Amino acid sequence: MATPAELIAPDASANRSVTVGEIHEVAIEKLVYGGDGLAHIGSQAVFVPFTAAGDFVRVRIVECERNYARGVIEEILDPSPLRRTPPCPYFGVCGGCQLQHLDYRAQLEAKVSFVRESLRRIGHIEWDEGIGVRSAEEFGYRSRAEIKVSRDEDGRARIGYFRSGTQEVCEIENCLILLPAANRELQRLHTESSLVPNDATRVHLTVGDDELIVTPANGEQGRAAEFDSMGTAHQRIAGVNYGFGVRSFFQGNRLLVEELVKEAVGNAAGKLAIDLYAGVGLFSLQLAKTFEQVCAVEGNKTAANHGVENARLNGANNVRYEPISVEAWLKYKSAEIPRPDFALLDPPRAGAGVKVVERLAAMAPPALTYVSCDPATLARDLRLLLDYGYRIDSITALDMFPQTFHVETVVRMRNVE
């Protein structure tokens, strides 16, 4: 049997490719973004789900591409000390979680490594300083869920999440990552399946501080406003009351969202702040406490309407919403305002991109915060900002989705030109 060290190091067979169906014994070197473990067979990278750094495993190759292969565990020969027994009986079948087999501290360390590796590999940013970590309880945190529904030939509802790597519904009666109120509702849907309409393909669960909204849905693409009209959930975060709808984006970790707000806003203060991709005003209404004026830009009309109403209900008369895409606002309307003292941007997974960064840099706010849900696009955009004269002050990783590979990152920057 080959040793882990021999499997990691290139050898005489380094250039040979593996083929589907082969069995190999490999050492898992580290986890990569997406949650898979990375091993090498010669120089061939092999990704293996549900592994831990330090595992020595027998794997079967199930997919081969030009630059990498994928394998599945046949047997764990020597388990990593980072492993634990997954608390959820559905883990490995349900596609919702990827990391329950890891000790929680190891999960946090892996997510920091995802951020640091993306900065280095994609952004060519060598950040040698620390990356802060913020976390809360690892279970019972999620305030929003999209429960999948399918029906058997006899019409019986199958209720749960998609199986890993498929769009087949895996029945789930108890989900450990949901807030207790949402989990109880999931259990009720199983015991009272008549509550699920026959034509429903999913059920949205949206939890506020004092309400739970249950919204069956099918084919809802383009119908966000209609679904939001079915109810508004409310949460009080850092002294501000927020309302948001079923299909309006809002941070899903009820236990950590206040820490996210504090980390993103920090001690920023001044005359004018701009909040790009403002959503329903999570950051805008906090910035309104310390800035004379806040310009909130949000292209999703439904979210912008919630933001306007949230500003009104909280008496934040110094928040002005611009219901227009960030790209269009920067191109056509940003010249109408003076130079902002502070900018905050919280783009979707695709990141801000070249044009947004270029036009934002032209406005030259002396300080900005970038909130990201994807380390790869964060690294790309940070590289652009650095090239435009910004410097990084701090990087913080927040575990908004424990048990998954996702990581939220807050980067504070300043303009040094």
Image: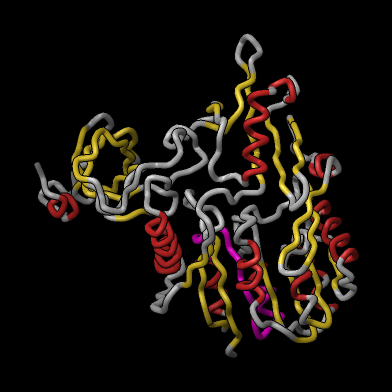
Quarter of the image with the N terminus is top left
Q: Residue lying farthest top?
A: 154
195, 410: nearer the viewer:
195
Side of 362 where 128 appears, left or right: left
Question: Quarter-wise, where is residue 412 in the image?
Answer: bottom right
Residue 67 is at least partly visible in this image: no
User: Residue 384: horizontal and vertical position, in percent?
Assistant: 55, 73
Based on the picture, tell me whether residue 367 belongs to the magenta stretch: yes
User: Residue 7: horizontal and vertical position, in percent?
Assistant: 16, 49
Colouring mode (rainbow / by chain / secondary structure / one colour): secondary structure
Q: How many marks?
A: 0
| Segment tinted magenta in the rendering | 358-378
Seen at 89% across and 70% down, the residue is: 315
User: Residue 247: horizontal and vertical position, in percent?
Assistant: 75, 45
Q: Is residue 337 above or below residue 36?
A: below
Quarter of the image with the C terminus is bottom right
135, 248: nearer the viewer:
135
Residue 88 is at least partly visible in this image: yes
Q: Is residue 377 above or below residue 146?
A: below
Seen at 78% across and 67% down, the residue is: 240
Seen at 74% across and 53% down, the residue is: 209
Q: Is residue 240 above or below residue 300?
A: below
Based on the picture, tell me whether residue 370 belongs to the magenta stretch: yes
User: Residue 380: horizontal and vertical position, in percent?
Assistant: 52, 66
244, 16: nearer the viewer:
244
Seen at 86% across and 56% down, the residue is: 305
Side of 282 where 30 appears, left or right: left
